[in-house]
Amino acid sequence: MQTGDTELIRAINRFHVLDTIRRFEPVSRAAIGKRTHLSRVTVSSLIATLLQEGLIHEESDETTNSGTRGRPTNLLGLNPNAAYVVGAKLSMHQVFLIVTNLRADPLARLSLPLHPHQLVPDAIVALLDEGVRSVVALAGLKLGQIAGLGIGLPGFIDSKAGISHWSPILAPEPKPVALADMVRRRLGLAVTIENDANLLTLAERWFGECQENDNFVVVMMEAGIGMGLFLDGELYRGQHGMGTEFGHSKIDRHGPRCRCGQYGCIEAFTADYAILREAEKIIRTPAAHEGADDTAEAETRVATVVRLAREGNVALRQIFATAGEILGLGIANLINIIDPAKIVISGSGTRAVDLIEPALRAAVAANTLAVLQNRCEIIFHDQGDEVWARGAASLVLQALYRKPWTPASGAEIAIMPGTTARHQKGRP
Amino acid sequence: MQTGDTELIRAINRFHVLDTIRRFEPVSRAAIGKRTHLSRVTVSSLIATLLQEGLIHEESDETTNSGTRGRPTNLLGLNPNAAYVVGAKLSMHQVFLIVTNLRADPLARLSLPLHPHQLVPDAIVALLDEGVRSVVALAGLKLGQIAGLGIGLPGFIDSKAGISHWSPILAPEPKPVALADMVRRRLGLAVTIENDANLLTLAERWFGECQENDNFVVVMMEAGIGMGLFLDGELYRGQHGMGTEFGHSKIDRHGPRCRCGQYGCIEAFTADYAILREAEKIIRTPAAHEGADDTAEAETRVATVVRLAREGNVALRQIFATAGEILGLGIANLINIIDPAKIVISGSGTRAVDLIEPALRAAVAANTLAVLQNRCEIIFHDQGDEVWARGAASLVLQALYRKPWTPASGAEIAIMPGTTARHQKGRP
């Protein structure tokens, strides 16, 4: 039980000072005192500690003091190089790795192909081991300088326990896989695993379009349709860390069979495989297999369908319009149920935004309750691969800014004063 | 900004002591110290204040000390009569009022008929004024002894602002109605208004089936289908306090028209008016009007349909089976998206539970993703009218137990030490 004592007070005050610096940098000690209502002594003491830990840095403000007397005012800001982290995104056909700092500046990146026979835990862990070491070297860093590794992957991920309950990347493993532990043992790094849509959601919150929003939804259009929920200022994970399966919510009682085995799922109309299934009825390409090894091939073939639709094939255009309508219907349901301030549609599926957007917006308007009309902003925002750097940096920031009065989050990555100092020394 | 100071520490410690007493009463000072890890001095000081405020009471424990020496151990418990509140539920055809204490014991109740011409703000406020005064007198109390009034009503209610953006009860008023303020001015009481499904959700949390659940959903089957979401330990209200419109989420692209004007809503299959619309095709009763004045009549007619279905009318039974299937499909979507620990189905619509439950459970099983199967408990729990006493008491408890480190909630009702003492004196 977290009862009130002087240690907690200091943690609370530290949070507010650090948060003020992050939000208003560069900022003076006086301004911090004013915003936090803390005494000069308290602010000075906390800042001394934060400087010593290397989390913030100080620079004299030449502008303000030119021509005035007295000591120059020193401005404080977050030290972007207080921590380096590696972000990894596991997809069906590649492992993408990126090294970044606290500001999510990309320092080095690496993409390793993933072959179907590697879609088992041991091979994935070996590939991550190799990939992380390589990308860290590419960034001119040593493994000891990395504060943590954040891994995003599709599936049912218990981030707190570091366990993947099910992921297409770790198939055919039917049992839960303690992925975070396995990677940690190989690399000796703090490792956090997270559902890829959740990681994308954190990236939107810390670096993207939702920095000011406490209630928003990220819909991720990749091979499947993922979702992240950010509610009341926190990432929402559900009771078992496994909800937010937007792609398999049903919007058509008499709809087609989905690859999950059920009927009328949003994915059964909008996922790559569904687009191709319908396209084959029109352009007679060879039948697509729906297996894991075909993801890359499917992407290429969808790109062809997109091109032909853009060139004017009316029947193909209708496939995307239907996908947009179904997605819009699902989004209207989210608005009716969750009442978010914003919905961000992201992921490689947004490449066909011009083909799906008109039908999507029409369906949202037709199916959102009158009282909720036009209250939720819907935007398309694909950040490309760098989003995984932002996601990894977000995990660190989330650990760093953990509110002292809330229960511990699942984030493994943490910045220890000692290691931070070492990082700084290690960096030329 | 809530920075750490000694006042905050005391508030945090007070919360933990009070919460420990509520959860483990009757409980000794020593046990409280053990559970909270607070010093004997701190615990004693806080308990002295709570006793003085009348929020807790003390009784000597005869059992434990029989035969032992030393001072008798005094056990502490919450004082159920520390506050009296009035709960009001506004429905289309009646205003139901109930007086209760902190333990939600019903002390008096009153039901006033509501006529169609009274469905305007001024008439509702006048009726509430009259009703509250009457029910308080029935309980043998004076208005000055009432800590607050909690009003539940259907519609889009901004509880924090005390405003009804839209409610069938306040129709045809198209503008927002500052209902809480209007009632407060008439009665001189602290007034909180709340969407009725949300009030029911709070009642489940504080007194019902979800006291141990941090993530649960309440589906309320009344004239329409309402919903309350309790997520991550808090009532979820959405960005504009207006979401959770489960009844108008769409589960059938080609479904029938709903009275909201859109198509394929859950209500278009499951609400009273939808049941009657289908039943009329079979049993040729006079066509039902869907206007506000027909709610009571509709309830009677639905009761007839339920009876005939129970007696074996196969076609009528199928109407309820379809309603159950649609509701199950919607509930499966909630499980897929929100991953709650429990879903409670409540309200007068559960009177036909035997007719809808088998199809409902089958549809949930058929449409919940494999990984989420059997992880969410679904129960039928109708609390009857007393639930509104529990809801009103919950509003007080919620204000009383507001965690000191979270932002202020919308609850208006608060217990002031001074007034509490007066209440106790006023009570014989």
Image: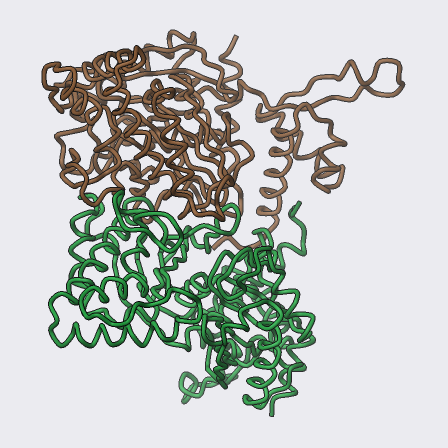
Chain colours: A brown, B green
Rendered image quadrant of residue A274: top left
Residue at the far bottom in the pictured view: B428
Q: Residue at x 17, y 52 (%)?
A: B365
Q: Residue at x 50, y 25 (%)?
A: A207
Residue B72 placement (x, y as % from top left): 50, 84
Residue B82 placement (x, y as % from top left): 57, 78
Residue A375 placement (x, y as % from top left): 51, 41
Closer to the camera in the image, B425 or A357: A357
Rendered image quadrant of residue B278: bottom left
Q: Is residue B417 left or right of residue B115?
A: right
Number of on-image labels: 0
Whether residue A163 is visible here, answered yes or no, is no
Residue A56 placement (x, y as % from top left): 61, 24
Vertical order, A299 against A373 (above or below):
above
Q: Is residue A16 left or right of residue A361?
A: right
Rendered image quadrant of residue A279: top left
Closer to the camera in the image, A382 or A55: A382
Closer to the camera in the image, B106 or A302: A302
Q: Residue at x 37, y 33 (%)?
A: A198
Whether residue B202 is visible here, answered yes or no, is yes
Q: Is residue B268 left or right of residue B261?
A: left
Q: Residue at x 59, y 38 (%)?
A: A15
Vertical order, B165 against B114 (above or below):
above
